[in-house]
Image (spheres, rainbow, N blue to C red):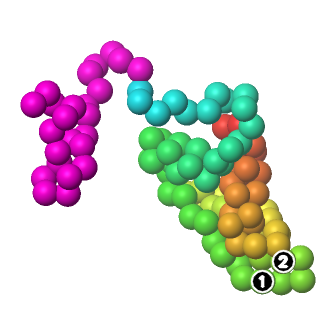
Amino acid sequence: KAPSQRTWKASGAPAPTVAKKGTQPLVQRPQQGAGMANAVSLLNEWSQKNRHILIFKDLGMQEGGFLCQVRVDDREFEPVAASNKKEAKRLAAEAAAEILGLA
């Protein structure tokens, strides 16, 4: 069988493919100017690559909704409120990324 036709162990799923050096990635990332589709991932990748400590603090629910605050190393950013936790985390990540110059 050709490598792409082999099954992965007993699961029956196709074997994972390995991209060759110098080829385009199989999954394309959104262009930088396409908005911040996933600011949480952007901050996670940036902090890992640059060895920063990234913390998303869930500050619970208050009058304005759910609050989330981003902390990078010793720097805390303003808490952001939204109607649900996921949206609060995304908005907090977008605000932090913009302040850090990543967006």
Say which quarter of the image contains residue 75: bottom right
Residue name at image x 80 percent, y 65 percent: 80
Name the disc covering residue 17, or none: none
Give the quadrant of the C terminus: top right
**Which residue position is annotated with label 1?**
61
The residue sitting at the right extreme is: 63
Left or right: residue 77 compared with residue 4? right
**Which residue position is annotated with label 2?**
65
Residue 4 visible from this viewpoint? yes
Q: Which residues are magenta?
A: 1-24
Q: Is residue 9 above or below residue 71?
A: above
Q: Secondary structure at mark 1?
A: strand
* Front-most of residues 31 and 52: 31
Q: Amino acid at mark 1?
A: Met
Where's residue 45, x and y in %?
Answer: 50, 45
Residue name at image x 84 percent, y 77 percent: 65
Mark 1 touches mark 2? (CB < 8 Å): yes
Residue 76 visible from this viewpoint? no
Where's residue 22, x and y in %?
Answer: 33, 16
Dominant SS of magenta comes to loop
Say which quarter of the image contains residue 69: bottom right
Q: Amino acid at mark 2?
A: Gly
Give the quadrant of the N terminus: top left
Residue name at image x 75 percent, y 45 percent: 99
Q: Secondary structure at mark 2?
A: strand
